[in-house]
Image (cartoon, rainbow, N blue to C red):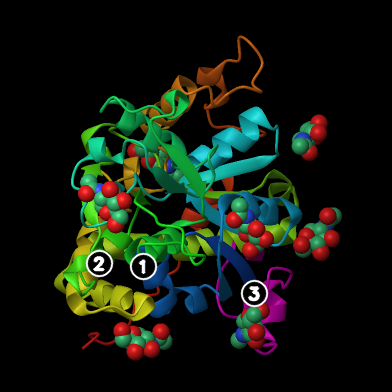
Amino acid sequence: MQVQLLCSLVAAASLTLADSSNAAPATLQNVNYGAFTQTATYSIANQLGFFTAYGLNVTYLQVPNSTYGYAQLLNGGYDIITGTIDNAVNLRFNSKNNLTVIGQLDQGPELSIAAIPNITDPTQLQGLSLMVDSPVSGYAYILRKVLSLYGLYLEKGDYTFQTVGSTNIRYADLVAGHLPNGTPVYATILTYPFTSEAMAVVPTTQRPNIIARVTDFIQPFSSSAFTIREAALGNSTERAIIRCFMAAMYAANQYLASESQKSQKCSIGAIAAQLNVSTAVATSAYNSAIDPLTGETSNPGGNFTVNRQGLLNVIDVRSQFGGFASVPAHFNYAQAIVPGAGKLIDYTVTDEAIAATNSYKPKGNCS
Ligand SMILES: *[C@@H]1O[C@H](CO)[C@@H](O)[C@H](O)[C@H]1NC(C)=O
Ligand SMILES: *[C@@H]1O[C@H](CO)[C@@H](O)[C@H](O)[C@H]1NC(C)=O
Ligand SMILES: *[C@@H]1O[C@H](CO)[C@@H](O)[C@H](O)[C@H]1NC(C)=O
Ligand SMILES: *[C@@H]1O[C@H](CO)[C@@H](O)[C@H](O)[C@H]1NC(C)=O
Ligand SMILES: *[C@@H]1O[C@H](CO)[C@@H](O)[C@H](O)[C@H]1NC(C)=O
Ligand SMILES: *[C@@H]1O[C@H](CO)[C@@H](O)[C@H](O)[C@H]1NC(C)=O
Ligand SMILES: *[C@@H]1O[C@H](CO)[C@@H](O)[C@H](O)[C@H]1NC(C)=O
C-alpha cells in the first residue's frame, strides 16, 4: 500500500508504514490556506475536527484583496486558495500564470448586490461609486453584467468603481457607510455569509439592502474554486499536503450535504462558532450553504466537479466587457476548459483525495 496516499495523524508524507508503526510522535502537516470567506465547509472541517483527523494544522489566511491573494499563491505564501474561478480564468488565460483549479466549492451562495439603506433599486446607483475588490477580476464583471441589464454601464460613465478589497472589508465599509478615510460608499457585491450577517445588523438604519440577486440574472455560475500552483502537482511534498487538505474538505463537505438531524445541528454550531454569530444567523448561512443552485453542495456529482455551464457563463460575462484583452485571437475556450494535465482544470489530486478519505466522524451531539 502506498503510504503517501494516507492522510492521518501519524502519516507524515515521507513516512513508510513501518516507520509510522514505530510511532514517531504524531505530527501535523502545516497548510497555509488563503481564503476570502470562511465557508461552511471550512467551518465544519475546522470546528468539527476534520483537519486534525486528516493530519493537518491548517492556518486560515484572510485574503485582503485578490491581487495580493493570487500573488501569494504563485509565490508560495499560500499552499492553496479558494477564490472565485474568474480570477483563475483571468490569470491563466490573460497572464499565462501557471495556476490550476482542482475543484469547485460553490456556485455563489448569497451572491448579491447590496446597498446602503436608502438605496432600494439598482437604477439609483446612477452617478455613484461602487466598491469592488479589483476592477478587472472576481466579481466586478458580474456587477457590470447585472447593472447593464438595468441600463447602467461603467464604460459610459453611469457609475465608477472604488477599489477597496475583499468581501469582508467591503461589508464592513458598507455597514459603516464610508471607507476608513471617510469617503462615502453606496453599494457592492456581497457573498456568503455576509448577506446572512447583514440581517443581524442593528440599528436597521445601517442594515444593507439586497437590491439584486445574481441568480436572477446569471445561472448557473461557477464561483469559489480550489486553486493551486501548477508546479505543486509535480512536487510530492506539496502534492501530499494538497491531497490531505482536499480529503478533509471533501469529508466535511459530505458531512454538510448529509442533512441528517445531527449533521444539521453540528454544522450550524460549527458555522456559528467559526463566524462568531448567533444561531439564527448561522442557520441562515447554513441554508445558503446547502442551496441546491448556489451552495457548497451544488457541484455536479457532489465531488467538487466544476459546473461546465457555470464556467462558460463566467467566461461569457467577462468577454462581454472586454475582459480577455490579452488573450490571442482565435483562442479556443471550449478546449481550454477541458480538464487535463497542464490545463486550467486538473482533477487528479482531488481524485486521489476522494480515494484517501478515512472513516472519521465528529463525536458528540454538538449540544
Ligand atoms: C500550527 O501552525 C501554526 C502557524 O504556523 C503554528 O504557530 C502552530 O504551532 C502549529 N500547531 C501545531 C499543533 O502544529
Ligand atoms: C492588497 O493587499 C495588500 C496586502 O495587505 C496591500 O499592500 C495592498 O495595498 C492591497 N491592494 C489594494 C488595491 O487594496
Ligand atoms: C508557465 O509555464 C510555462 C511552461 O513551463 C512557461 O513557459 C511560462 O513562462 C510560465 N508562465 C509564467 C507566467 O511564469
Ligand atoms: C442615499 O444617501 C446618500 C448619502 O447618505 C445620498 O448621497 C444618496 O443620494 C441617497 N440616495 C437616495 C436614492 O436617496
Ligand atoms: C517541493 O516542495 C517543498 C515544500 O514546499 C520544497 O521544500 C522543495 O524544495 C520542493 N522540491 C522541489 C524539487 O522543488
Ligand atoms: C464575538 O462576538 C461578540 C459579540 O458580538 C464579541 O463581544 C466578541 O468579542 C466576539 N468574539 C471574538 C472572538 O471575536
Ligand atoms: C465526480 O462527479 C462527476 C459528475 O457526476 C463524475 O463524472 C466524476 O466521475 C466524479 N469523479 C469522481 C472522482 O468520483
Asked whether the beta carbons under mark 3 and mark 2 sit within 8 Å of each other, the answer is no
Magenta residues span 1-29
- Magenta segment: does it hold 59? no
**Does 101 appear above or below 196?**
above
Q: Is residue 321 visible?
A: yes
The secondary element bearing badge 1 is classed as helix
| Amino acid at the residue labelled 1 | Ala
Q: Nearer the viewer, residue 364 or 207?
A: 207
Mark 1 highlights which residue? 176
- Tell me whether the residue at label 1 lies in contact with that at label 2, contact meaning CB atoms closer than 8 angstroms: yes
Residue in the image at 41% along x and 27% along y: 317
Q: Position of residue 70 (x, y in %)?
A: 63, 50
Quick check: 320 above or below 227? above
Please report the residue visible at 41 percent of the width from the left and 51 percent of the height from the top. 105
Circle nearer the viewer, 1 or 3: 1
Task: Work out whether residue 255 or residue 322 is closer to the camera in this orientation and state it.
Answer: 322
Cα separation between marks 1 and 3:
39 Å
Beta carbon of the mark 1 residue lies under 8 A of ligand 4:
no
- Front position among marks 3 and 2: 2
Question: Is 137 above or below relative to 22?
Answer: above
